[in-house]
Amino acid sequence: DADVTQTPRNRITKTGKRIMLECSQTKGHDRMYWYRQDPGLGLQLIYYSFDVKDINKGEISDGYSVSRQAQAKFSLSLESAIPNQTALYFCATSDSRTGPQETQYFGPGTRLLVL
Amino acid sequence: GENVEQHPSTLSVQEGDSAVIKCTYSDSASNYFPWYKQELGKGPQLIIDIRSNVGEKKDQRIAVTLNKTAKHFSLHITETQPEDSAVYFCAAPSGTASKLTFGTGTRLQVTL
C-alpha cells in the first residue's frame, strides 16, 4: 500500500553493525506494527505501538528496539545485527476507530541481509 | 496465546480449478479471522475476513468458511486465474483483536 512506506527497501550490513529501518504512513492510523517474515514461518510480530507513547513487545523482540517518533513514524533498530536477523521486515498500520477488528495495512517490506 | 496452523504450505492447481487452504486456531475466544494475500515483492493485503457470528462469507470467486466447534476456517478460491498466484496467510486475534497471529502461509501457483 503506497500509504505505508518503508526505507530502505534493501539493506546489506555486517555482523555487529547497528541499523535502523524506518516506516512512515499517511493513512492517519494510530496503531503501527513491525513484523518479520522468514520462509516457512509466516509473519512474526516484533513490536507494536497503539499510540505515540505506547510501545509493546511482540513474539520475537529480543535483539530489536523501536521508536515511535510521531503518530506517522515507527522505526525498528537492530542494535548489533547478527546473521539470523536476515529476513524480510514489514511495517503495518491499523485504525483503532474502525475496531475492534480493524484491518492491518502493510508496507512493501525491507529485505535485510546480515553478513 | 493464539496458535494458528495452516495447510498446505504449497498448492498447485490448473487454471479454472478450485483451491482450498485450511487453518486451525487454538483460542476458542477468537472471533475474527482475516485472510491476507501477498504478491511477489509486495506486502500482504487483506482479501476477505469472517467474524464468528457467521459460518460463511463470499466475495466473488473467494469464500471463507468457519467452523467454531472444530476451531478451523478455510479459504476457497473458485475458477482460479494466474493472478491468484501468491502466498496466502490466515490469521486469528492474539489477545486484543489488533494483534494478529498469522499462519505460516500457503504458496498457491495457478498453472495454465
Image: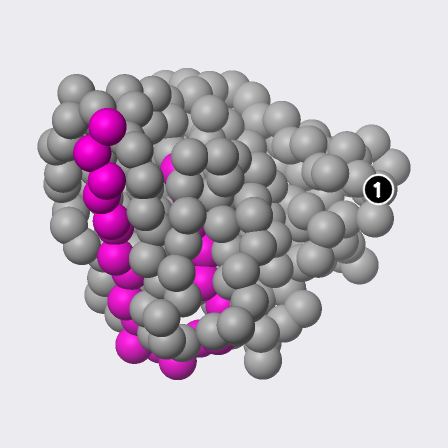
Q: Which residues are magenta?
A: A16-36
Q: Is residue B88 left or right of residue B92?
A: left
Is residue A22 one of those drawn in magenta? Answer: yes
- Would you place residue A74 above or below residue A82 in this image? below
Residue A113 in the image: above or below residue B46? above
**Quadrant in the picture for residue B73:** top right
Residue B11, by quadrant, is: top left
Q: Is residue A66 above or below residue A100?
A: above
Residue pictured at 45% horizontal, 62% vertical: A32
Residue at position x 42%, y 35% in the image = A63
Q: Main secondary structure of the magenta part?
A: strand
Q: Quadrant of the C terminus of chain B?
A: top left
The x, y position of residue A100, in whole percent, is 67, 68
Q: Quadrant of the N terminus of chain B?
A: top right
Q: Secondary structure at mark 1?
A: loop
**Residue located farthest toward the right when viewing the structure as drawn:** B69
Identify the subunit bearing mark 1: B
Tell me the quarter of the picture where residue A15 sits. Answer: top left
